[in-house]
Amino acid sequence: MTPQITALIENIRALESQLDAELAKRRAELRVGLEHGRVAFEEELLRRHRELRRRLLPYVLGANPLVILTAPVIYAGIVPFLLLDLFVSVFQAVCFPIYGIPKIKRADYLVFDRGHLAYLNALEKLNCAYCSYANGLIAYTREIAARTEQYWCPIKHARRVIGSHARYALFDDYGAAEGYQDRLAAQRKALAAEVPRTDA
């Protein structure tokens, strides 16, 4: 990897840290906190949230009929999501110990905190839980696939890949054959040395 690419990766990580800090400031402005790992709002703010909640019946009756008709299509996705969840969890449990890859904590990706928002009605909370599950599961799956790719084939593609995972930037350059096996061994060693996150 060139020094310029290394510097760009470091800049991206620094920007991600800045973004995290700004998001934390915004949560503080909104007076959102955590108490014993649970979301906590000030009582006055919680009362105001309840006042802003849209009642369930008017919410459903005011919905676009086409939205109501397409809802079963959206929710039918739960079946393949559950199967994917089962498969990638078993895949990780069986394969990662054999390869020496640190396991991924599923709970770091599946976050269901929107149910604490008092300004959402029951249907909105259900929708949020579904979206949280689907997107969290995709992120969890992606990290399992990314670690697997880092172990087996950490080589960039010849052309630009849209939406590549965070590990991709560290992969070997396409066509850099000299010393590939050594770099592959180094990638595997770096992967095995990763310390699981504990900040979730």
Image (tube, rainbow, N blue to C red):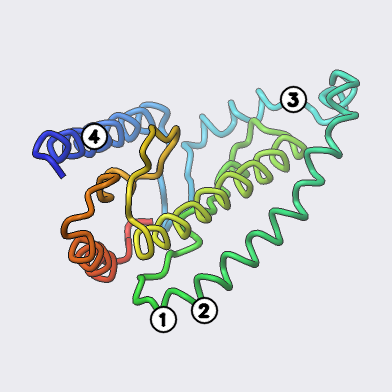
Mark 4 or mark 3, which is nearer the start of the sequence? Answer: 4
Q: For the residue labelled by badge 1, is the local secondary structure a helix, a strand or a loop?
A: helix
Q: CA distance from mark 1 to mark 3?
A: 51 Å
Q: For the residue labelled by badge 4, is the local secondary structure a helix, a strand or a loop?
A: helix
* Residue wearing tag 4: 12
Q: Residues within 10 Å of mark 1 (few under 14, many from 20)?
A: few
Q: Residue 35 at what x, y percent from top left?
A: 42, 52
Q: CA distance from mark 4 to mark 2?
A: 33 Å
Depth check, mark 4 against mark 2: the one in front is 2
Taking the spot 56% from the left edge, 68% from the top edge, the residue there is: 89
Query: As shown in the figure, which amino acid type bears the numbered disc 1?
Result: Ile
State yes or no: discs 1 and 4 in contact (Cβ < 8 Å): no
Q: CA distance from mark 2 to mark 3?
A: 46 Å
* Residue wearing tag 1: 98
Depth check, mark 3 against mark 4: the one in front is 4
Query: As shown in the figure, which amino acid type bears the numbered disc 4?
Result: Ile
